[in-house]
Image (spheres, rainbow, N blue to C red):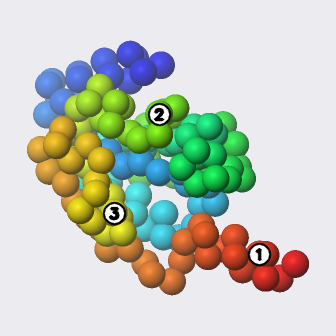
Amino acid sequence: MEEELKEQINIRKHFFHERIVFTNGCFDILHSGHLELLYNAKSYGEKLIVGLNSDSSVKFNKGRQIINEKDRSEILASIEYVDYVIIFNETTPYYIISYLKPHILVKGSDWFGRIIGSDLVEEVVEVPRRLNISTTSIIQKIKEKT
């Protein structure tokens, strides 16, 4: 799967001169802040690749995993401005960014100064984060109501 995606991306970059954008995350409970990030990310290029933390990676990074990777990837793939979803098992997306070599890396501003893979791309874009919503705050609200 990764090799096939890399080949498609290289064809698009070299023959069609398309700008390839990459973002990543757990997307454990998809919310409007995620959608805003993805929409903004797509505006920076022709193809948007979303790196999705695998179940084991989410558990390692967050200490929890709510929705499985298969369902999360299907949800993300159904969003019209997402062109490719690739699941990665590592704790960070560094390897997959170095492998795919996108032009632009987009992350939320909450990652300011610690964007993994920024040394591998031509441009890094930090999208302002909506402060009123996060997966953690959604989980907390659910806990408070039960």
Marks 2 and 3, the one that precedes in the sequence? 2
Q: Residues within 10 Å of mark 1 (few under 14, many from 20)?
A: few
Q: In the shown orientation, is residue 40 left or right of residue 113?
A: right
Residue that numbered label 2 is attached to: 90
Q: CA distance from mark 1 to mark 3?
A: 25 Å
Q: Which label is found at residue 142? A: 1
- The answer to whether one can see residue 111 in this image is yes
Mark 1 in CB contact with mark 3 (< 8 angstroms): no
Of label 1 and label 2, which has the lower sequence position?
2
Q: Say which residue appears at 83% left-offset and 82% top-offset.
A: 145
Residue beneath label 3, please? 111
Q: Secondary structure at mark 2?
A: loop
Q: Residue at x 58, y 54 (%)?
A: 62
Which of the two labelled residues, at mark 1 and mark 3, occupies the earlier sequence position?
3
CA–CA distance between discs 1 and 2? 29 Å
2 and 3 marks in contact (CB < 8 Å) = no
The quadrant of the rendering that contains the C terminus is: bottom right
Residue 117 on image: x %, y %: 26, 43
- The answer to whether residue 21 shows anywhere in this view is no
Say what amino acid the circle numbered 3 marks: Trp
What's the residue at 12%, 44% (across, down)? 122
Q: Position of residue 3 (x, y in %)?
A: 38, 16
Quarter where residue 121 is shown = top left
- Element carrying mark 3: helix
